[in-house]
Amino acid sequence: MFGLGTNTGLKRISCGGTGENYPDLLYVKRRYIHKENLRNAIAQVVNAIFQVRMPTIWGEGTTACASDSKKFGSWDQNLMTEWHIRYGGRGVMIYWHVERKSVCIYSQLKTCSSSEVAAMIEGLLRHCTDMKVEKNYVDTHGAEGAIRQALDFKSSEPDGQSEVAFAFCHLLGFQLLPRLKRIHKQKLYRPVAGLGNAYPNLQPVLTRPINWELIRNQYDQMIKYATALRLGTAETEVILKRFSRSNIIHPTYQALAELGKAMKTIFLCEYLSREELRQEIHEGLNVVEQWNSANSFIFYGKNSEIATNRLEDQEIAVLSLHLLQICLVYINTLMMQQILSEKDWLKLMQKEDWRGLTPLTWSHINPYGTFRLDLDERLLIDPVVS
């Protein structure tokens, strides 16, 4: 797992004096290291972190996570490889779902042009951990830019497709909380007709009323598509591509857009009026950005480039990185809890210290050198903290 998760490779690991040769490691990888097994291992480690956490140190459990993607370089012959229009260079995207205490519950390998909204919904529905997600933070690209990029390159509206994301998240029981960069371009939709003179201070940003009758007529169809997403009977990206600007006359698309406009208007009113909500979204996105920073530290082999053309090996490399990094969070959680359980150290903690406390640190780790693996010896950390 160290060889796969750090991208150093099995050949280099077999030369470390462990007594295992390359054919043996390759045999174990081909026979036991599969996508499903790695996802099960990640889910077990994530659930273990939730179980050992001390509420007095980390606070109560959260139902919010942040979603973001990170670009990794890959070979040109790789069928997943594309040129990224925003970051530049060839590569693939890894989409992460990280909760507010630095625990990544799900990861996906995507192409650079794939829909970030589809990846966001997929992770919220398929993470298979004990966490119950109710809120999801995304940045501007996750809420608007990636939707326009993946669903419709010819959209005339500045953020016309973001309403579909708001609609599907609402139907699936998630609250979409984006950090909008172009906040001055947003419009608020009126709740009903006949209120042209109401809200005089908001007249410059108000627009037409919501068509509730259209939503009511297409309610069954919208629920059908949302149920297909939840049950996994249809691919998320396929459904989202169906509701693009090129299919604007589709009545279900129009109803989804209307519902999304209503939900987005509610969100904008809360976002502008509540400073604590803006701080909450910003804090959640900072956590996932820190997770992305740790990727480069752990996945340092071969210049952090996925050096394979097989899709299965690419997914195994991504999941191995996820497993290695989540194990780092698990060990750091136990170490910090052991230290802060002592009263002398607990008294030194100030308010700013608690706010900056995170289990995702790596300055105390040296990823280079020779590592001796002894499965008969345990770390001097309590495996379960009461």
Image (tube, rainbow, N blue to C red):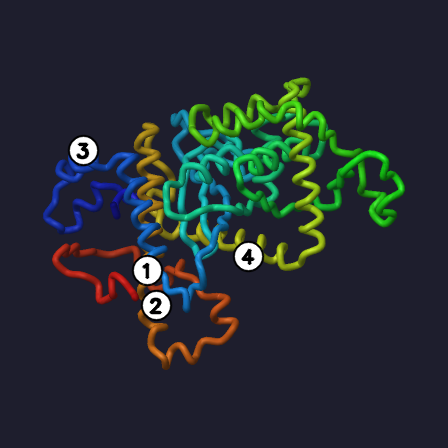
Which residue: 56% across, 35% down?
Answer: 171
- Distance in Å between CA atoms under marks 3 and 2: 37 Å
Give the mark, 3 or 2, whose residue is nearer the N terminus: 3
Looking at the rendered structure, the kind of residue marked 1 is Val
Which numbered disc covers residue 52?
1
Picture quarter with the C terminus: bottom left
- Distance in Å between CA atoms under marks 3 and 4: 41 Å
Question: Is 287 left or right of 176, judged from the image as shown?
Answer: left
The residue that disc 2 covers is 337
As helix, strand or loop, the secondary structure at mark 4 comes to helix
Question: Is 169 left or right of 324, judged from the image as shown?
Answer: right
The residue that disc 3 covers is 31
Name the front one of labels 1 and 4.
1
The residue that disc 4 covers is 283
Q: Looking at the rendering, which quadrant does residue 361 occupy?
A: bottom left
Name the front one of labels 1 and 3.
1
Residue 288 % position (x, y): 48, 50
Residue 106 visible within the image: yes
Looking at the rendered structure, the kind of residue marked 2 is Gln
- Distance in Å between CA atoms under marks 1 and 4: 23 Å
Name the front one of labels 3 and 2.
2
Q: Looking at the rendering, which quadrant does residue 156 occupy?
A: top right
Which residue: 46% across, 40% down?
Answer: 124
Looking at the rendered structure, the kind of residue marked 4 is Glu
